[in-house]
Amino acid sequence: MEQTDPRHLLVKIAKLLKKLRIPYLVTGGIAVLVWGRPRFTADIDIVVELEENNLKKLKEGLMKLGRSGYVDEELMRQALADRGEFNFIDGQTGVKVDFWLLKEKDFFDLSRFKRRVAKNILGEKIYFTSPEDLILIKAIWYRMSPMSRQLEDIESILKISGKRLDMKYLRKWTGKLGLSKILSGRTLSQQT
């Protein structure tokens, strides 16, 4: 399998989503590259606002991205029903893309979707989660599965993007999401 910069696949997928008019935002490790420190990431995480009427078109488009790609239409349908996730594996690079369905009744999901930020990646406009929302989602992931990588990512976002963070928004959602224990020594006291 060819080793490649995952940003190339990200650009292809962003173009496909734009063509299909599927709103999205990039989160996870690739977003940490934008708002924090460079680090290795083995996958791409994308939140999508997917509807039944464009599910099949998305599957077909993903399969056209390269030889031997893999996506399971039944798992896509299940993710749509559950507002969960499905993935696509690029056959050329082996890079996995996790597609997370926007949870329409989750006020935080809706808020972070409205606050997405366009960034230029390899000459293309790509929509990313805001740095504040990335901090919050990393804290949520840490709460679900306490891995030091999540805290390291939070620290790097604070260090690189800290002065530009909307601390009022971050404090508001830290309280609403019950993340004070995780973030209290990090975001709220370091950046004022």
Image: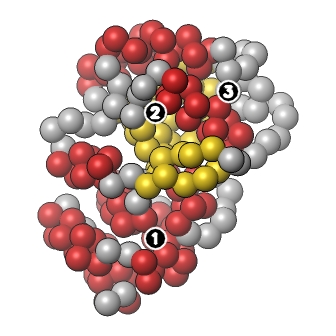
Residue 148 in view here: no
> How far from the left and from the top, in percent, is residue 39?
66, 62
Location of mark 3 (residue): 90
All told, the count of numbered labels is: 3
**Label 1 amino acid?**
Ile
Locate residue 75: give its quadrant. Answer: top left
* Quadrant location of the N terminus in the rendered image: top right
**Nearer-N-terminus badge (2/3):** 3
Q: Which mark is residue 154?
A: 1
**Nearer-N-terminus badge (1/2):** 2
Residue at x-position 32% and y-position 74%: 166
**Label 2 amino acid?**
Phe
Instruction: Tell me the SS state at disc 1.
Output: helix
Other residues around mark 2 within 10 Å, as few (<14) / some (14–19) / many (≥20): many
Other residues around mark 3 within 10 Å, as few (<14) / some (14–19) / many (≥20): many
Other residues around mark 1 within 10 Å, as few (<14) / some (14–19) / many (≥20): many
Location of mark 2 (residue): 99
